[in-house]
Amino acid sequence: MTTMKRLVSSLTISLCLLSSAQLSAHELGLQLFSLRHQFADDPAKTLDQIQDWGLLAVEGSRDLYGYSVEEFKAQLDKRGIDVVSTDTSFEEIRDNPMAAVYRAKFYGAKYTTFYWVPHGENFLFEDAEKTVKVMNEAGALLKKHGVTLQYHAHGYEFLPYKDETLFDYIIQNVDQAKFQMDVFWAKHGGMNPAALLKKYPGKFTSLHLKDRKKGTPNSSKGSADGDTNVVLGQGDVGVAAVVAEAKKQGIKYFFLEDESSRVVQQIPKSIDYLKSLEKF
């Protein structure tokens, strides 16, 4: 084999390996809600910031920050930012799921996610039952149109039910939709996020990565002070273990979310932390 042929062969193999690695790699993105205050001040500058961070896979779309829907998509396209998961609501997928389909299709998104189930002071078994029913019905419809429905639990679902929790009842009985784990809310609701991933392999299709200030008490109310969000790796969530398990399961999308007043300062540090992990 000539020197030139060896070089071509070596380059071909390298490109194939690189292509394979890229195809199997997850995507690190951003939940746009993180920058809601910045969007309110200067939406174009905020989109530039997201681009500068290299977070080109995002979740959002219901808030347009003063743009028309066409203008907002054009601003995203201009910067190479893809909406891979659109926002929806329990009420929308219950009453008008085709609206969620059209929104996802408009952005070219593979997923649509809802984040809250209306309930009284406490989340009850009846609430879990209606969640299962709506998720299966809407999830089947969305699936026909190539969109995966995800439910993002907020911690109130982890109240006891029989020998497990109401969340266990939901996830065990939904077969037409998937779940998004917000590791902060899982921890805040009293769960071990990495253990929950291991318990239900294949059920979670994306994550919200955020960390919780050490010493923060758990809650079943689905609410917390935004400033308990700290730089990844500095809190009590166990982000490294979560990432390692998620990678093992082949979970593709990791959305950074930071609800603190320090979000602009913290996100670059969280990105650096993730890059330092052996499994990331």
Image (spheres, rainbow, N blue to C red):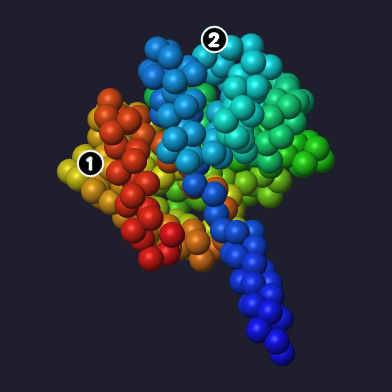
Going from the N terminus, do you reach mark 1 or mark 2 first? Answer: 2
Q: Which residue is mark 2?
A: 66
Foreground residue, 23 or 111? 23
Foreground residue, 194 or 109? 109
Q: Position of residue 170 (x, y in %)?
A: 56, 45
Residue with the most extreme front position: 3
For the residue marked with disc 1, what is the amino acid?
Answer: Lys
Q: Position of residue 280 (x, y in %)?
A: 43, 59
For the residue marked with disc 2, what is the amino acid?
Answer: Gly
Foreground residue, 77 or 113? 77
Q: What residue is at 73 percent from the left and 27 percent from the top?
A: 106
Marks 1, 2: nearer the viewer: 2
Q: What residue is at 26 percent from the left and 39 percent from the top?
A: 230
Q: Which residue is mark 1?
A: 213
Packing grade of label 1 (10 A; few <14, some 14-19, many >=20) is some
Q: Is residue 138 left or right of residue 62?
A: right
Q: Position of residue 5 (x, y in %)?
A: 71, 81
Q: Is residue 142 left or right of residue 129?
A: right
Q: Is residue 276 above or below residue 261?
A: below
Say which quadrant the N terminus sits in: bottom right
